[in-house]
Image (tube, grey):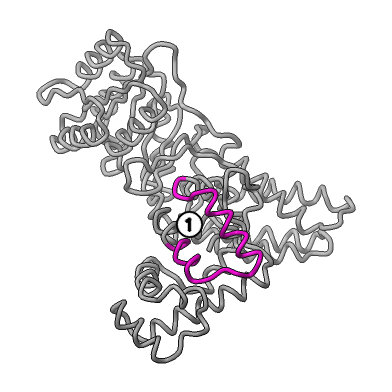
Amino acid sequence: MFDQLIRQFDSILRNLRGLGKITDKNIQETSRMVRRVLLEADVNFQVACTFIDRVRTKAEGTKIIKSIKPGEQFVKIIHDELVQLLGKNASPLACTPSTTVVLMAGLQGSGKTTACAKLAKRLKDEGKSVLLVAADVYRPAAIDQLNQLGKQINIEVFSERSGEPVKICKQAVEEAKTEKVDVVILDTAGRLHVDGEMMVEIQKISDEVQPSEILFVVDGMTGQDAVNSAQAFSEALPLTGTVLTKMDGDSRGGAAVSITEVTGKPIKFMSTSEKIDALDVFEPERIADQILGFGDAISLVKKAEAVMDLDSAKAIEKKILDKRFDLEDFLTQIKQLRKMGPLDQLLGMLPSENRNMIKKLNFDNRQLVWTEAIIKSMTQKEREIPHIINGNRRQRIAKGSGRSVQEVNHLLKQFSLMQRIMKKKGQLNIPSLKGDMKNLSGLS
């Protein structure tokens, strides 16, 4: 997610941090590079130009301010303006004291039905009662899909295959209010904004049920097309926000960067994987941190805390500081990493410096699996004192793990590199509840 933006901004910011002072020349050069990066990421042209104008204006205003680190000041300007562009603050769901009605609209294939279920799961986890409504009568598979998802998350689905969408939604909302359900989520049919009849239908649904939220669900991978569609829908409906789906497959990020500025409506949620619980509140500052290579320490800490035992994490951290980190500890960390999710996602949450440091180890998800197998084939003494592993021991370990001797050699080389990195860094912070999230420096 945002891989292209992260990679290109990393290069720009590294150059900026080395600036001795802010001048007209480096303002122009940086502005030109940032504009190119944004356009290559499929950011809306006008949005990119507006962003650059804001950055340039602020940077020019800081030229006469004496600062120890002018480059860092320039980086902060870019960060602050990017946060502003993304929406400034998170925009929570507008829940009412009585039944809250959420109308989900979008194009066909945008992932709307799945997004409805993900939102329902999130609300249920927050302690709210939820009713899902299958109002897409034009695609029977959509009703079946929502019913299956409802069973999966144990949430009731209201559906009538032969009914009229407007009547279905009205009846479902009335029933929910009678039962005092906290939130009703209406899964409407996918439609094009140029389809007059279908747009009239969703406008009637909106008029009848008076939803608290009208969310436009859009596939983030479609870039500027997503922005154009959102703008068209906002002209037909009083949208209150957008939900970006399939963001795990979007390496550019153009839709996320552009859509709020163009539509004037906040991004409320973002889907980050196919898992049913992978719907995150869109937080502009955290996304800006991630795009600019500052990492996403909060998300990383949350993932770590879900699988890590605090006492064992502290024990390993102490061993690292005392330079006693061995293959047994490495195995423990690998097991915890595998529980936290795909390695590429975790690396994306690290600051650029630490991400690059970990990438030197050349690990991927498959390697984590066979690395665990190799270490488990070692004796306790071999895990504690890796340098005793000679040729005969390596052959035995390879045979026991079902891997090649070359792979055993590769692992030992990686571990040796990791130990050198740790000595150079001085310490490797393990994320914990009591840790400083903003200063998270790495994860083995």
Is 74 left or right of 393, judged from the image as shown?
right
**Outermost residue toward the front in this view:** 381
Question: Is 206 in front, or is 394?
Answer: 394
User: Where's residue 316, x and y in %?
Assistant: 56, 60
Residue 311 located within the stretch drawn in magenta: yes
Tell me which segment is drawn in magenta. 306-334
User: Where's residue 67, x and y in %?
Assistant: 86, 54
Which residue was labeled with disc 1?
346
User: Where's residue 330, x and y in %?
Assistant: 49, 67
Q: Is residue 102 visible?
A: yes
Q: Is residue 291 visible?
A: no
Q: Quadrant of residue 181?
A: top left
Residue at the image point whose x is 68% and y is 72% from the top: 424
Residue 319 located within the stretch drawn in magenta: yes
- Considering only vertical position in the picture, is 28 above or below 383? above
- Neighbor class of circle 1 (other Cα within 10 Å; few <14, some 14-19, many 20+) is some
- Considering only vertical position in the picture, is 392 above or below 207? below
Residue at the image point whose x is 39% and y is 76% from the top: 378
Q: Secondary structure at mark 1?
A: helix
Magenta stretch, main secondary structure class: helix
**Outermost residue toward the left in this view:** 162
- Considering only vertical position in the picture, is 125 above or below 170? below
Is 378 left or right of 8, judged from the image as shown?
left
**Outermost residue toward the bottom in this view:** 391
Residue at the image point whose x is 15% and y is 38% from the top: 141
Question: Is 133 in front, or is 45?
Answer: 133
Q: Quadrant of residue 209?
A: top left
Q: Quadrant of residue 11?
A: bottom right
Residue at the image point whose x is 26% and y is 27% from the top: 155
Amino acid type of disc 1? Leu
Quadrant position of the N terminus in the picture: bottom left
Is 80 left or right of 378, judged from the image as shown?
right
